[in-house]
Structures are given as C-alpha cells and as structure tokens.
Amino acid sequence: MANTEPGPTIPVEEYPQRWRQVQRLMDEHRIDLLLAYGDDRAVSGAAHVRWLANIPVHFEPMCVLVPRAGEPSLLCGPESDQYVLRVGQVPDVRVLREFTHPDEDYPYTKIEGLAEIMADMAGGPGSVRRVGLAGRSLLGAETARAFEAALPGAEWVDVENQVCALRAKKSPAEIAVMRHAYHIAEQGIQAAIGAIHPGVYERAVAAEADAAMRRAGAEGTGIDTIVGSGPNSRPILARSTWRRIGATDLVLLTVAPRYEGYHAAIGRPVLVGDPGPEIRGALDAACRGQEVCFRGLRPGRLGRDVEALGRQAVAEAGLGRYFLYSGLHSIGVIEFEPPILGPSSTTVLEENMVISVDIPLFNTPWGGLRVEDGYLITAGGAERLNQTPYLIEIPGGQ
C-alpha cells in the first residue's frame, strides 16, 4: 500500500479573508445578512460552505450566516456539529431544528430553531432588512419558508453570481492546491489507461482510476469517473457499466478528483486497436480545438471569444453540430463552476483564474469524446496544468 504524503492545503488565515470579501460585497449591495446554503450535491451544489468554512457538506445540509460586521455562524444538523467544530473554520456552530430529521431524537444535543437563532443576532431579526442568498437554487421550499418566517419583512436578494465571482480568481494557496489536484488527476488517467485492454469491464477500469486517485490523496470526485466504451461513449455524461471493452473501441475517460475541496478535470479518448478513420479525424479536430483555445487564453480577453476558436476548429472538420455545450468554464471548489464561458458569456478572463477547456464531440453516429485540460491564466497567457498526451493508443486483439 502506498504511503501518501500530505500535499498543500489552504491556510487557516485565508478563511477570515474570505469572510471580509463577502462583507465588502454586502456593503456594496446594502445587505445586512448573507445566507450561504449548501448540501452534498457535489456536482451541482454551489459549495459556498466549503469555500467559507472548509466543511465538505455531507448527509445533512448546512448554511453559513455572514453578518455585515463581525464573525459568521454555521448552522448544521445534529450529526454534523462535532465534525464541523473539529475541522471547520467557523467557531460559532449551531444545530438547527430545520436541518434535523423530524422522526429522529437527539436528547443530548442543543437544537435551536431559526427564530431563536435570529433573535440572538445583534439587533435581532428586526434589524435585518436585506438578506443576500447564495445557493438559492438548492434551497428546498420548506426550508426557504422557514427562513422567510424567521426574518419577517426582510427583502431577499439573490447574490449567487456575485459570490461566485469572488471565487473566480484564485489565491496563491488555491493555485498550489489545484496544481496538486491536477497531479492526482493525471495519476488517475494513467491508471485507467494501464487497465484498458480488450475484454476488460468499464467498471474495472474506473475502479483502477479511482483507487489511484485515492492513494494519491483525493478526498473524492466532483463527478463520477467516466469510462464509456463503444456506443457507451455517445452521451455527454456517460456512466461506467458492465460492458466489456472491444478490440477496436473508442474509450472515453474523464476524471475529476477533489483534493482539499478543489477539483481538477482531465478528459481523454483512448483508441483500442483501430476504431477507424472517422474517429481518428474527430480526435484530431478536438485536439486542434484544445490547442487554439490554449493559445487564445490571456487576461483581458472575452472568454466567449476563446471558446469560439475551439468551435471554429471543430466546425472546419464538419463536426460543429456535435459541439453540444459551452467549452470553457471555471474550475475550483466545484468541478464545473461559474463563470461559464460559452457563446452568451460576457466574462473577461483575468489573471489567476483557473479555466477548464473542454472540447466536446457527442451524440455522433460513432460515439463521443472530449479532450479536456486545465489552465492557469497568467500575466502573459496561460499555463497548462496537466501534461497527459492527446493520442493514447492501446493494442487491439484478445
């Protein structure tokens, strides 16, 4: 068994700096209280709780309450409080009745309702006139009604985009953590490649990738590891199955490990034997798209203009109708996080953003593939964060 050594982490002093960033945002928008909701939807969740408190939300929902001045509070369920106190960065932790299962008893836990917690806040609930809400799309109707009842008369303001914008530019510590995440991702891809041969099950290949990334220090994944072969490669979000990989198959690989709360993502097609000239031509087009986007990444440029370069390369190969989604997006505490830099985006690239360039070709007659790499935006352009080769071939035959 490998003895994995710890890699870089986010220093504890960075979390209060994030709280101050949020409070400056609150000042700009005249917000008295900001509520950042989170749950364990690791792919679609906003992950604000991880960013603000370093807590990987699991099983029970949580939220961070940030006042306009002072320190935040964290609200969680009764099975999470001791974990939060042990590893989190917000010292004031309350167990919220609204996050407690109605049929479960916790006789030795202090459980408070929202009304009680709001009454304890400086000035009481009557002093809160405007509430900023981050993670609104995840908040259930019943919980939303409970918050509204606890703050009667308050105006609720959706600040999801504004809070996500605070996360777009990465700190030096975040960049170091993400470099390590890409190192882990490359180990996962290499393990998957080493496991591919005709006759092996897709799930066996995925297991090798996951095991390698865990051994390298991953705490989990942002999306389930994708191993899709032959016709199973056709959907955008393939799932590994009990299909055996064939002697002349295209195999789609995508890994997205999470390390210290931050993600990396690498996508590659693997050619087993000779899957034919059509697939090889598509791979060439996707690689050209990746390269022109890489050369186009630089501060001050509209993200959509860079994405358009990748679309053009694919369209010139006659495959434009298979480029099915936005090809550039930020990556960080979520594997697929704002800003999303597709044709309708107005976001300008800035130094210290980390951008995933994902050139997709899906729903084709022969299957599908993606070529995905990560880049750090630098003062003079971009730095590629992984070095996995584009052309990966495995001998066919049994």
Image: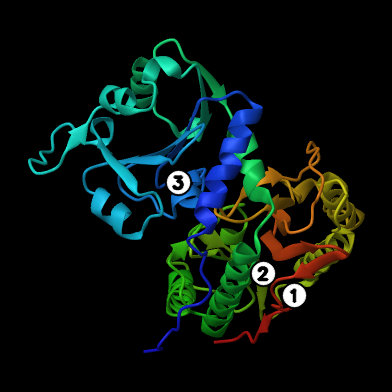
Tag count in the figure? 3
Looking at the image, which is closer to me, 160 or 309?
Answer: 160
Q: Residue at x 51, y 50 (%)?
A: 16
Residue under pointer 2: 268
Q: Nearer the viewer, mark 3 or mark 2?
A: 3
Q: Residue at x 79, y 52 (%)?
A: 350
Instruction: Residue 291: tell me if it is visible.
Output: yes
Q: Amino acid at mark 2?
A: Arg
* Residue, far right: 316
Residue under pointer 3: 49
Looking at the image, which is closer to me, 178 or 361?
Answer: 178
Secondary structure of the residue carrying tag 2 is: strand
Q: Position of residue 254 (x, y in %)?
A: 59, 65
**Position of the C terminus by quadrant:** bottom right
Q: Residue at x 38, y 55 (%)?
A: 88
Secondary structure of the residue carrying tag 1 is: loop
Q: Amino acid at mark 3?
A: Val
Q: Position of residue 345 (x, y in %)?
A: 78, 38
Q: Quick check: 390 left or right of 85?
A: right
Q: Earlier in the sequence, mark 1 or mark 2?
A: 2
Residue under pointer 1: 390
| Residue 44 higher or lower than 351, as above or below | above
| Residue 248 higher or lower than 91, as above or below | below
Badge 1 crowding class, 10 Å Cα cut-off, few under 14, some 14 to 19, many 20 or more, is some
Instruction: Residue 364: tell me if it is visible.
Output: no
Q: Earlier in the sequence, mark 3 or mark 2?
A: 3
Q: Position of residue 259 (x, y in %)?
A: 50, 67
Res. 316 image quadrant: bottom right
Disc 3 to disc 1, C-alpha distance: 36 Å
